[in-house]
Amino acid sequence: MQRTLANTEATPCTSDGKIAKLRSFIEGMEAVLQTSRDAIETMNGVSTLLSKLIANDDWLPAPFAMPHPEFYQQYLLHADPAGRFSVVSFVWGPGQKTPVHDHCVWGVIGMLRGGEVSQGFRIIDGSLRPNASLERLAQGDTARVSPETGDIHQVANAFADRVSISIHVYGTDIGQQRRHLFDPATGAAKDFISGYSNMPRSDG
């Protein structure tokens, strides 16, 4: 697969109408990145664009919305050639969740289908402490992560009986970004590179 779904030719699974919405989003991203002065302005612009993209659940091709019976899936939709951002669909089977992890870069999440629950964490005196409240996303909602405002969390499908899908935009090629998994009991961090469910691993 190419490193951008938006540049693929239309197929029975990727009609022109579907691809056009993603292409329009990526064009909007270019404008946001060219005019934003800092990460906050960038996330503001991305949130506005992403809200429009997830307002209708009719554009994500079926191959990028397929759940796995055991593991959540992270499908690359677009990787900017200059490494400035990536667009990913996260597909959650019923009850599936991530480990506790960080991103080491800004990110904006938009709920396309179903719902998510996110438990945020902070490191205090070397210990991993959960935030007092959970963050819940329903269809059409957006959320943000960044090293400056809160970057450690664990995310789960809000439903035990259905698939949920969210669209994530990150300020780098997140599948190649070295970041961290955390042991909830000890707070110990371990480096990892996530890769993508639809791309070969390249981290050796």
Image: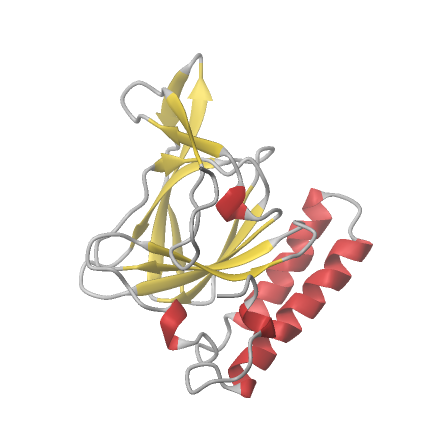
Vertical comparison of 116 with 13: above or below: above
Quarter holding residue 92: bottom left
Number of numbered tags placed on the structure image:
0
Q: Is residue 9 left or right of residue 34?
A: left
Q: Residue furthest front?
A: 204
Q: Give percent across and percent down for residue 144.
A: 54, 48
Write the residue at 37% across / 24% down.
Answer: 129
Q: Position of residue 93 (x, y in %)?
A: 25, 60
Residue 169 appears left or right of 102: right
Q: Which quarter of the figure has residue 199?
A: bottom left
| Image quarter in which the C terminus is found | top left
State the residue at coordinates (47%, 67%). Answer: 140
- Residue 55 drawn above or below residue 74: below
Q: In the picture provided, is 25 more to the left or to the right than 87?
A: right
Q: Residue furthest top?
A: 125
Q: Position of residue 101 (x, y in %)?
A: 40, 35
* Near-viewer residue (29 or 86): 86
Query: Residue drawn at (63%, 74%), measured in percent from left and top?
Result: 23
Percent x, y for residue 31? 76, 63
- Residue under the image location 30 percent in, 27 percent down: 184
- Picture quadrant of residue 48: bottom right
Of residues 176 and 164, the one drawn nearer to the viewer in this rendering? 176
Instruction: Check the image and tell me how it is coloured.
Output: secondary structure
Horizontally, residue 112 falls left or right of residue 19, namely: left
